Amino acid sequence: MSMFGIGKNNQTINPQNIAMAEQEVEMMSDIFNRLVMTCHKKCISPKYYEADLTKGESVCIDRCVSKYFEANQSLSQHMQKRGQENPTP
C-alpha cells in the first residue's frame, strides 16, 4: 500500500493521507528554503568575484548545512520526547 492509500484492491485515495503528504512537503520545502537563506547569508559574500564558490565558501556551506541538520534533528528529537512525556488529550 502506498502512502496515499492506493492499494491493489483499493483504488480510492485517502484525503487525510494526501493532506499529511502535502503538509510534509510544505514543511521540508520551508526547511530547505531557510537553510539556503541562512547558509548563503553566512558563507557567501554579497559581492561575487568569481563564478564558482571559493574553497572557503564551499567549506563554510558544508559546515553550515551539517550544523543546520544536526540542530534540526536534535530539536525534532527533543520535541518528540516532550510530546511523549506530555501527550495531549
Image (spheres, rainbow, N blue to C red):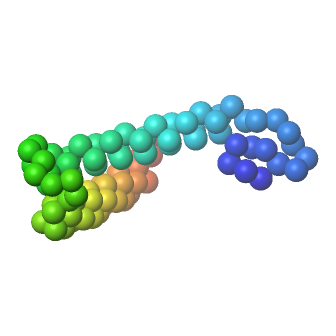
Q: Position of residue 35 (x, y in %)?
A: 28, 48
- The reply to whether residue 60 is visible in this rendering is no
Question: Which image quarter: residue 6?
Answer: top right
Please tell me which residue is depicted at 40% across the width and 49% down the height of the picture. 83
In this rendered view, identify the residue nearer to me: 54 or 18. 54
Q: Position of residue 24 (x, y in %)?
A: 50, 42
Q: Residue furthest right?
A: 9
Q: Is residue 16 above or below residue 61?
A: above
Q: Is residue 52 above or below residue 17?
A: below
In this rendered view, identify the residue nearer to me: 6 or 43. 43
Question: Which image quarter: residue 85?
Answer: bottom left
In this rendered view, identify the residue nearer to me: 45 or 51. 51
Please tell me which residue is depicted at 21% across the width and 53% down the height of the picture. 51
Q: On the rendered structure, is 66 left or right of 60?
A: right
Count of marks overlaid on the render: 0
Please tell me which residue is depicted at 82% across the width and 35% down the height of the picture. 12
Question: Which image quarter: residue 75?
Answer: bottom left
Q: Position of residue 49 (x, y in %)?
A: 10, 51
Q: On the rendered structure, is 85 left or right of 21?
A: left
Q: Position of residue 77 (x, y in %)?
A: 36, 59
Please tell me which residue is depicted at 8% across the width and 44% down the height of the picture. 47
- The reply to whether residue 36 is visible in this rendering is yes
